[in-house]
Amino acid sequence: MNVMGTSPIIAFFDVDETLIRTKSMFSFLRFLGQHGLAKDTEETIDRLYSLSESGVDRSEINRLYWMSYRGLDAEDIRSAARRWLDEARGADREFLIAVTMKRLRAHQQSGHRIALVSGSGIDILQPLTSLIGADFTLATRLKELDGRYTGEIALPVMIGEGKAQAASTLAVQLKAELRNCFAYGDHISDLPLLNIVGHPVAVGEEGALGDHARGLGWLVLSTREFSTAGAAA
């Protein structure tokens, strides 16, 4: 996995269904509802899934999702994120996807910087960032007013081109050459991120991204390998 060069090397990882076997945004919102920290969460989730199935654009679903956080106390949410991660890991021994965790650990051993790149919220993902020892979290940031979320998000919107924009900005800041960097994603919407690096990797053999990756000769990782949560230790 060593790549020649003196500039830093960054390994960018999408999160949901790339590093973890769940959609963190929906899993976390359900957790908030179960613990009385947010109202009508199941109704919100059902509505967003219905919109997705009817073909509504991902960016619009993302916007509607974050509007459901309007008025919630930011510190309460950050605290809940730690409890959510502990609960999710306890309930699913394969919460962390073994094959990508092995790649992540190999990158760390090679001295590469690790950046999580996700449409999920930075406040939701911060405990995961700490758990796996990632260096950066490029994720959705919610605007706050007097300690409460407004329901609006700060740019860039971390979907598609937004992920690529955030990754490119980090590479410039670190003086890293993207042709030497790696990126991992599981969905066709991750293509803008995968396209900007020299070493794109598709996670999961099925779906449009897997087909696209094989057509270009990219590495495709199978997620059929299971491991315990100890992969993050």
Image (spheres, rainbow, N blue to C red):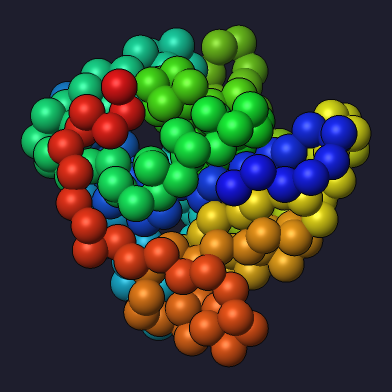
User: Who's the residue at 18% across and 51% down the image?
Assistant: 226
Q: Position of residue 169 (x, y in %)?
A: 84, 40
229 vs 203: above or below: above
User: Who's the residue at 65% across and 33% down the image?
Assistant: 112
In the rendered image, which quarter contains the C terminus?
Answer: top left
| Residue 70 appears in view | no
Q: Residue furthest left?
A: 91
User: Who's the residue at 28% across and 41% down the image?
Assistant: 96
111 vs 221: above or below: above
Q: Quadrant of residue 217?
A: bottom right
Q: Is residue 179 left or right of residue 215?
A: right
User: Who's the residue at 86% across and 34% down the image?
Assistant: 6
Q: Position of residue 57 (x, y in %)?
A: 56, 72
Q: Is residue 179 left or right of residue 120?
A: right
Q: Is residue 146 left or right of residue 28?
A: right
| Residue 226 appears in view | yes
Q: Nearer the viewer, residue 35 or 121?
A: 121
Tally of marks: 0
Q: Is residue 117 left or right of residue 85?
A: right
Q: Nearer the viewer, residue 229 or 158?
A: 229
Q: Nearer the viewer, residue 22 or 106?
A: 106
